Image (spheres, grey):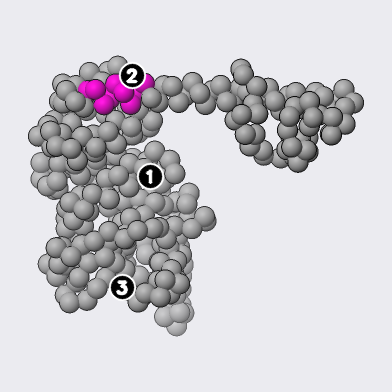
Amino acid sequence: MNHHDLFFKATFSIRENATDFVRHTLPPGLGEQMDFETLAIEKGSHVDTALAENFSDTVYTCRFSGTQIKIALLFEHKSTPDTNLPFQLHRYMSNLWENSIKQKQPRLPVIPIVLYHGWKTWTPGTLITQFKNLPDDITPYIPDFEFIFVNLSAYSNESIKTSVFKAASLRIALLIMKNIFDQQKLEHHLTQFLEIGRAYFQETQGLKFLEAVINYILQATEIEPDKLVQTVACISEKGGDIAMTTAEKLRQEGIQKGRQAGSHKTMVSLVRNAKKNGLSEEMIAQIANLDITLVRKILNNEPVEIPLHLLPDS
């Protein structure tokens, strides 16, 4: 799961954010019949391996005009349009219903809401629009359904800040996601974005969300950690401490990963050079203290994970 996915899930696992987002993105006719008091998050995901590069999901159940339904909040990974979206959604919804059968639960109607944060304008059609020049007699045989598509590029920063959504954490999250691919703009407006949550960041939940924001920015952009710490500290003193701790933690993790990568490369070179020098696989395994199956994988150029305690110091 990448940093975009993690931030999406951190944002929409907050019930207040999901309620606010769904309330303001559903067509009025649907929203008026939704009992938002019953909105409840579901555990698990319906994204299979084939869909993992396209979506992340967070699913809620809700009462709608006396009927139980599901609302699937889906985060479109790609920063550019993908014409396969309707087909991917079809697969996703099939997965959701199939999982209901496996769990011996009733199959419920699903409203898919797709969030796209790319900078290119995109208005995807439904599944049936992907088939061109269809004869009228064929149309009834094409499975089709509506979905709600939320394109963040269609919203101005000002409308997100002041007029569309209510929850402070949701507004901050959407503003950051909207501007995440324009580092200069994000850095320029970040103080204004975080100012929305000044009061919220006095609460424990607010600080937890702020930590997710800090993690996201540090991992998804090249904004200088010191600048980020200063910006956050101007809004929340405790938040500044969190930013400093998070930046240092990520720095140490980066150093460790670099060391591990270097050690891994050293071990692979050692095994291959030993083979070139005429040593048997058994002898190489003994010298390198590796299982012979790992030695053979290295020599066959197969992907291999070497246990950390067996890697040489770099």
Q: Is residue 243 in the magenta section?
A: yes
Instruction: Please state which of residues 130 and 170 is positioned toward the viewer in this rendering.
Output: 170
Quarter of the view holding residue 206: top left
At horizontal 67% and vertical 39% (from top left) the residue drawn is 303
Give the side of residue 111 with respect to residue 128, left or right. left
At horizontal 61% and vertical 29% (from top left) the residue drawn is 309
- Report the residue marked by disc 2: 224
Name which residue type carries label 2. Answer: Glu
Quarter of the view holding residue 290: top right
- Report the residue marked by disc 1: 5
Quarter of the view holding residue 247: top left
Q: Position of residue 84 (x, y in %)?
A: 46, 57
Name the image quarter holding the N terminus: top left
N-terminal label among 3 and 2? 3
N-terminal label among 2 and 1? 1
Q: Which residues are magenta?
A: 240-248
